[in-house]
Amino acid sequence: SRSIDLAVIPGDGIGQEVVAQGLKVLSAVLPQDVKLETKEFDFGARRYRATGETLTDADLEALKQHDAILLGAIGDPSVPSGVLERGFLLKLRFAFDHHVNLRPSKLLPGVATPLAGQPEIDFVVVREGTEGPYTGNGGTIRKGTPHEVATEVSVNTAFGVERVVRDAFARAQARPRKKLTLVHKNNVLTFAGHLWTNTFNKVAEEFPEVTTDYIHVDAATIYLVTDPARFDVIVTDNLFGDIITDLAAAVSGGIGVAASGNINPSGEFPSMFEPVHGSAPDIAGQGKADPSATVLSVALLLRHLGYEAEAARIEDAVSADLAERGTTTRTTEEIGDALAARVSG
Amino acid sequence: SRSIDLAVIPGDGIGQEVVAQGLKVLSAVLPQDVKLETKEFDFGARRYRATGETLTDADLEALKQHDAILLGAIGDPSVPSGVLERGFLLKLRFAFDHHVNLRPSKLLPGVATPLAGQPEIDFVVVREGTEGPYTGNGGTIRKGTPHEVATEVSVNTAFGVERVVRDAFARAQARPRKKLTLVHKNNVLTFAGHLWTNTFNKVAEEFPEVTTDYIHVDAATIYLVTDPARFDVIVTDNLFGDIITDLAAAVSGGIGVAASGNINPSGEFPSMFEPVHGSAPDIAGQGKADPSATVLSVALLLRHLGYEAEAARIEDAVSADLAERGTTTRTTEEIGDALAARVSG
Ligand SMILES: CC(C)[C@H](C(=O)O)[C@@H](O)C(=O)O
Ligand SMILES: CC(C)[C@H](C(=O)O)[C@@H](O)C(=O)O
């Protein structure tokens, strides 16, 4: 019989509330014969304040035992900026080699967008997750003096770029439009740009059916608001991916419905799924958070583990729920209940 | 009697056409007693193809003799990506220490925006122009092999950050709303982020009337499409500024009307003014390009040289022209003529 052994990290702020609904929908969608086991981990601001720890070797060892990880949100104003981001979120992505950061953007019917004319939006960003300016390379000299110099080093390897570019080509190949856009800034960042562009062109030869193009990251932000329909699959660097996926989420219904996967395609380490939104401390504990992004992250998790039908059922449920939502205000739990009812129905 | 001695670089593609209109409007707006001298420089793709040169020491010496520089656009598909960008545009910004890259965004009445509901947009981005990931620091080893490593180094100095932050505070102080937002990614790029954030907070003490806030660059892209009215003055790093000003241009009427100044505030070197758009080779020579962005860049140039009344007259003319434009299609020259008539009228 089948089973899913899930590590659950509710985290900070609204993390607790939205993860509870994600798990509710997960239980509801799974067939009887699939045994679901979950183990909750108390990571985030509370633990950091109590112990000074963010993510220890023992924590990583414990997480590694699970099939996948569901995360709510990490971050709290009580913790200095960067501590939990570098010490937990990025540490986990790097330790578990989550090099494919998958962020789909789809404007669902009935969902509000800040763009005029309700454009067609249905693309996926494949963001590199373990290189670029995110490696923590760099440093500071003469800190706090008028002669301070601070550097940040973007590190890009043929190995790291090629594997994510190949993953993106395979995803483009599997979609009806079969189109892949490389987003970079190769006219200015010429060293990294050359590696990305050359690798992209080389791998393209293995995927003759995939149409390719290239645009600079600055121009990409223009297209995301003037012609988002031009995108099918985008592959890009870690930092550019961070920036354009927030914009992509904004134009396709907001971060309330944006899901993401931090994927280790080889399966050597568990992959992690999380909503794009943060811990939103201002609305935490009030039942106001929309759990849809977490529920959609559960769908990505299921797809990753091979439960395609269940993933699709969740996506259809969220889509239907959003289409019928109108202007009613429901609590986090009410939305979770409605989605659970739809997927089991 | 007063005089303006201008270096003019029409450049590539539509550069020629739009600069001609910019100069026409400049001549029309200037009072009789101001003597305008212009010297044209043939830089860009044509010269690079003919001589292999982009910008020599002698060129810089010649440009240095002028009060200011007006540039159309540089770039052509016949030249490999990066050659003219690094070899001309960035070389000039660095050689003339253009550390204040000024990019105003104002949604004028009657101008189309991709955003629903015609929001109020009126802010200025002060983008650092001589540091960050634009310095060309970095390199490649094992190029073209499966073991290639390419790095890009973002260099940030207290000197470089403080002067641009101080410039931005002064600009915020001079505006009615007196609000300054720092945009960075200090939770991930912690070395540079610390320098930027600390410098910002330190300089803030000298400007007690200015309201300040901080947002991450990824979140900034969300606000630019969901709530652009929240911004008054933004100060940011070279690369983040590149990205968010293209988005800012897109939401506030498109790059057809986006002007910019590459400013050396000390006056040690001439400042350069240019439209944000590129050379648009696909429409070059067809009289289709909108010269408004160049004309607005001329306004920034005049303001920089102390001709505030003339700058305002140009801005009012462009604003009135756009408001009355409707759906008529006019040529580049017709728009230039209309603007020249308005400013002299
Ligand atoms: C919180 C932060 C470290 C993170 C990132 O920059 O990757 C977030 O913005 C994201 O996009 O997942
Ligand atoms: C052409 C390129 C070098 C330039 C930049 O990246 O600064 C352009 O995008 C700009 O914004 O002026």
Image (cartoon, coloured by chain):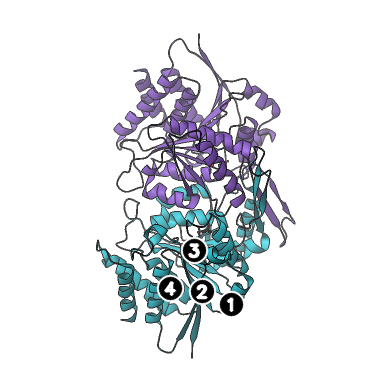
Chain colours: A purple, B cyan
Task: Determine the CA span between mark 3 and mark 4.
Answer: 20 Å
Query: Which residue lies at the image location 65% right of the left edge and 57% below the top edge?
Result: B156
Disc 2, SS = loop
Ligand 2 under 8 Å from disc 3 Cβ: yes
Q: Which numbered dot is residue B299? A: 4
The answer to which of marks 3 and 4 sits earlier in the sequence is 3
Residue B47 can be seen, yes or no: yes
Which label lies toward us, 4 or 1?
1
Mark 2 vs mark 1, CA separation in Å: 9 Å
Q: Residue B23: give x, y in percent of width and height.
A: 41, 76
Q: Is label 2 within 8 A of ligand 2 (CB to nearest ligand atom)? A: no
Q: Relative to B276, is A100 above or below? A: above
Name which residue type carries label 2: Phe
Label 3 marks a residue whose chain is B
Q: Please, which residue is most extreme toward the bottom here?
A: B1
Marks 2 and 1, the one that precedes in the sequence: 2
**Label 3 vs 1, first from the N-terminus:** 1
Q: Nearer the viewer, residue B258 or A149?
A: B258
C-alpha span from label 3 to label 1: 19 Å
- The image quadrant where one finds the C terminus of chain B is bottom left
The answer to whether the residues at label 2 and label 1 have Cβ atoms under 8 Å apart is yes
Which amino acid does the dot numbered 4 rest on?
Ala
Q: Name the residue under label 3.
A: B74
Mark number displayed over residue B62: 1
Categorize mark 2 by other alpha carbons within 10 Å: few (<14), some (14-19), many (20+): some
